[in-house]
Amino acid sequence: MVTLNHYLLVSGLLFSIGLAGVVVRRNILTIYMCLEMMLSAANLTLVAFSRFRLVDGLPDYNAQALVFFTITVAAAEVAVGLAIIVALFRARQSVDITAVEKLKG
Amino acid sequence: MPAVLFYLFSALTLVFGLLVVVLRNPVASALSLVMSFVGLAALFISLDAYFIGIIQILVYAGAVMVLFLFIIMLLDIKAEALKKVNAFSVVGGALLAIVFIVQLGMILSGLDAGKKTVNDVPVHFEAAAQTQKLPTIKEDLAKKSLPDTKLVGLTLFHRYPFQIQLMGALLLVGTVGVVILSKREVN
């Protein structure tokens, strides 16, 4: 049977894949996609806990409201982030993060 | 939801999630992420969160990933040349992921609340119909159907009215910011 632990484990695996992607990849766009993946993994945890913690016999809709806000913030963040990536590409002609290391000590 | 479907959709989510990291062509990565999000949306729906599942497909798999594909094709990015992969970062990333998973496994193995299945905590339609005040939600609950979207809307607009206006302001600021960021300087 599928338990809450199964959902939490899938969410954790997805999060760790995204985390590894952020560390390993050097293409800014792929790093950004991995960030989105981590946000969605957190959303899965929230929805799972919402379903398994009943309030007045219904799933806890506060958690789903939080997921709604997360998705909204993520959408706004993607728009701004991609605009920054386009500006960066205009300045450097590259989307490789090794092209942007002026702040490196 | 039958266990088979759960395993199918989690495998879909995780395999395509892994492909996002492994594939070198950004277009292939983006399309894999779309498939991963579709699997995730199915998992949301299996948890009776129909509204969030549909939003996941519409906003993430639809709008956000189309934006990604637009930018990838606008910038005309070729697949990364097969440079030597930085062994240090690969080992570091894999190690981070493994440490995270081991920690999670240790926590989950001791979590008694996590051993419940969805059938152990069924939605109580009668009890919910007693406590809910809106007639439209009461009618749906009396018919033993979960008015998911109505309940999310009720929570959003009754409990978080200020926050939802804040979201509107955030989206406006984001839109203005994107326009300013992508405007070329005219000398």
Image (cartoon, rainbow, N blue to C red):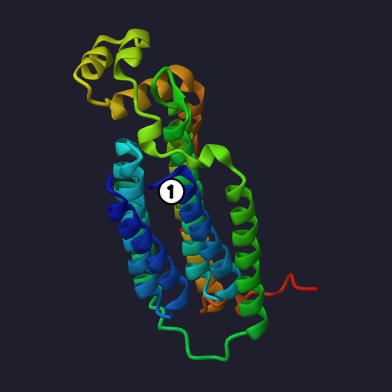
Q: Secondary structure at mark 1?
A: helix
Residue A12 is at least partly visible in this image = yes
**Percent of width and height locating residue B56:** 35, 47
- In this view, the residue in front, B140 or A28, is B140
Q: Is residue A95 above or below residue A22?
A: below
**Percent of width and height locating residue B39:** 33, 56
Q: Is residue A89 above or below residue B117?
A: below
Q: Is residue A104 above or below residue B132?
A: below
Number of residues whose C-alpha sits closer than 10 Å to that of mark 1, classed few (under 14), some (14–19) or many (20 or more): many
Answer with left or right where residue B68 lies relative to residue A77.
Answer: left
- In this view, the residue in front, B151 or B62, is B151
Residue at the spot 31% in from the left edge and 51% down from the top edge: B3
Q: Which residue is mark 1?
A: A75
Q: Quadrant of residue B74?
A: bottom left
**Percent of width and height locating residue B96:** 65, 66
**Percent of width and height locating residue B27:** 35, 73
Judged from this view, the residue extending furthest toward the left is: B143
Residue at the spot 22% in from the left edge and 25% down from the top edge: B145
- In this view, the residue in front, B67 or A88, is B67
Residue at the spot 51% in from the left edge and 48% down from the top edge: A42
Total number of numbered labels? 1
Q: Amino acid at mark 1?
A: Ala
Residue at the spot 25% in from the left edge and 9% down from the top edge: B135
Q: Is residue A28 above or below residue A79?
A: below
Quarter that holds the N terminus of chain B: top left
